[in-house]
Image (cartoon, rainbow, N blue to C red):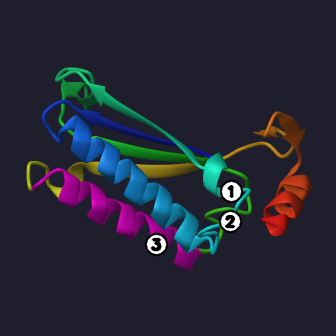
């Protein structure tokens, strides 16, 4: 499940971005009851990217911020408790990584549920059911 963490340069150091990415990955697995799952742990991936100072806009004007996007099957991030718990924890992780250089109001997050049958897991295209079956084995 690809996660993406983008932030404007200066909001956090590259090392802090890496630490935040690891912690967010761990939180994602934890909130789904998958900590240590041998199938999902290596398949929760994250892209971390620092954007140039003018690489993000809000209302058409340059803005400093952090953006977290999670692309998941429809059965992930499906319950309100998991949504609130995971995104609160992720926001806390990002806020800490930014070391007070960024207000919480500039930390943005969202989830995108993908089309069933489009997951590539270990080189094999899977439906949600096939994916769930594989996860249950881990």
Taking the spot 55% from the left edge, 72% from the top edge, the residue there is 31
Which quadrant of the figure contains the C terminus? bottom right
Residues at badges 2 and 1 in contact (C-beta under 8 Å)?
yes
**Residue 92 locus on image (x, y percent):** 28, 65
Q: Check disc 2 and report the residue beneath it.
A: 37
Taking the spot 18% from the left edge, 30% from the top edge, the residue there is 9
**Residue 80 locus on image (x, y percent):** 56, 75
Looking at the image, residue 115 lies above or below residue 39:
above
The boundaries of the magenta stretch are 80-99
Looking at the image, residue 76 lies above or below residue 65:
below
Q: Earlier in the sequence, mark 1 or mark 3?
A: 1
Query: Mainly helix, strand or loop, the magenta region?
Result: helix
- Alpha carbon distance from label 1 to label 3: 21 Å
- Alpha carbon distance from label 2 to label 1: 6 Å
Q: In the picture, residue 136 is in which quadrant?
A: bottom right
**Residue 123 locus on image (x, y percent):** 82, 33
Q: Which numbered marker is on residue 84? A: 3
Q: Is residue 43 left or right of residue 67?
A: right
Q: Residues within 10 Å of mark 3 (few under 14, many from 20)?
A: few
Q: Is residue 21 magenta?
A: no
Q: Check disc 1 and report the residue beneath it.
A: 40
Q: In the picture, residue 66 is in which quadrant?
A: top left
Q: Secondary structure at mark 1?
A: loop
Q: In the picture, residue 137 is in which quadrant?
A: bottom right
Q: Secondary structure at mark 2?
A: loop
């Amino acid at each position: 499940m690809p996660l993406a963490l983008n932030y404007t340069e200066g909001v956090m150091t590259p090392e802090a971005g890496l630490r935040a990415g690891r912690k967010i990955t761990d939180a994602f697995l934890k909130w789904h009851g998958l900590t240590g799952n041998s199938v999902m742990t290596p398949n929760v991936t994250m892209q971390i990217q620092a954007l140039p100072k003018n690489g993000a806009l809000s209302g058409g004007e340059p803005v400093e911020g952090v953006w977290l996007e999670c692309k998941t099957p429809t059965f992930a991030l499906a319950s309100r408790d998991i949504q609130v718990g995971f995104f609160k924890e992720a926001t806390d992780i990002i806020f800490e990584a930014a070391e007070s250089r960024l207000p919480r109001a500039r930390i943005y997050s969202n989830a995108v549920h993908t089309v069933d049958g489009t997951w590539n897991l270990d080189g094999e295209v899977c439906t949600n059911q096939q994916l769930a079956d594989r996860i249950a084995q881990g």
